[in-house]
Amino acid sequence: MSYSIREAKAKLSEIVRDAEDQPVTISNHGKRAAIVLSPERYDGLLEEIEDLRDRLAVHESRDEPTMPFDKLVAELGLND
């Protein structure tokens, strides 16, 4: 669902209701200017970001050596 800023000014209540079900895009001169989300979806996204940060921190804290996937594939001879 998408609205121009002009439409959004006139239909704010409708946009807020629509955002309960799915994100609503507000555009300015054809370019996305804002996304309206329900509080539940917003909170869910923040939780996902925090989970990903935690996973990354665990991964970075390991002392195990790592190598790029393509180098591993080449070393194992799997790129043929």
Image (cartoon, rainbow, N blue to C red):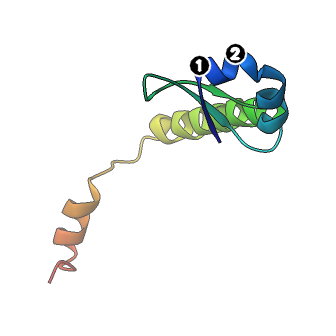
Say which of 66 and 18 sits in front.
18
Q: Amino acid at mark 2?
A: Lys
Quarter occupied by residue 51 = top right
Q: Which residue is mark 1?
A: 5
Q: How many marks?
A: 2
Residue at horizontal 69%, vertical 15%?
Answer: 9
Q: Which residue is mark 2?
A: 9
Tag 1's secondary structure? helix
Residue 19 in picture, x, y percent from top left: 77, 35
Residue at horizontal 33%, vertical 50%?
Answer: 66
Q: Are marks 2 and 1 in contact (CB under 8 Å)?
A: yes
Gap between marks 2 and 1, in whole Å?
Answer: 6 Å
Q: Amino acid at mark 1?
A: Ile
Q: Residue 79 shows which numbered tag?
A: none
Say which of 51 and 32 sits in front.
32
Residue 5 placement, left or right of 22: left
